[in-house]
Amino acid sequence: MTRYHIALATLLACSVAPFSQAQTAMRQPGDPQRWYQEDSTPQAQLRTLRKEISAALAEAKKACRSEPSATRATCLKEAQDTYRQDMANAEKLREAAHPQ
């Protein structure tokens, strides 16, 4: 499995997990109430998904920086390519996470 596939699988898991855990997660003291409110509109869901895609890119870049310098540039390029592809397919990902 390539880093791209791992990153994509991680992104999809991260994208869907907050929605599935929102109703089962135990509220912790100090947590903002908004963490436990499901996005009620497609626009809000898409906005959240775009934030998650951006956060996944930041995590992937951080992971790439810990790789040997010989593979770092390729890793960063794959992370950026994954980000672009996921942003281009954000609406499809949203629909998959929130079937009507």
Image: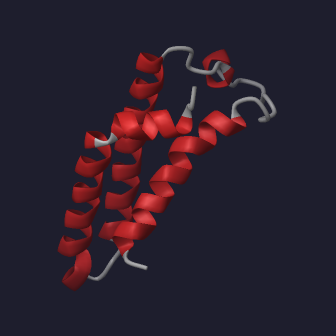
Residue 88 on image: x %, y %: 25, 41
Residue 19 on image: x %, y %: 62, 34
Q: Nearer the viewer, residue 98 or 53?
A: 98
Label total for image: 0
Q: Quadrant of residue 49?
A: top left
Q: Residue at x 51, y 43 (%)?
A: 15
Q: Left of 68 or right of it: where is 10?
A: right
Q: Left of 8 or right of it: where is 19?
A: right
Residue at the extreme front: 100
Q: Residue at x 37, y 73 (%)?
A: 3
Q: Residue at x 41, y 62 (%)?
A: 7
Q: Nearer the viewer, residue 12 or 79?
A: 12
Q: Quadrant of the C terminus?
A: top right
Q: Quadrant of residue 35?
A: top right
Q: Left of 40 or right of it: where is 45?
A: left
Q: Quadrant of the N terminus?
A: bottom left
Q: Nearer the viewer, residue 76 or 50?
A: 50
Q: Where 7 falls versus 95 (above or below)?
A: below
Q: Left of 91 or right of it: where is 15?
A: right
Residue 64 on image: x %, y %: 32, 68
Residue 27 on image: x %, y %: 78, 28
Q: Nearer the viewer, residue 43 or 30?
A: 43
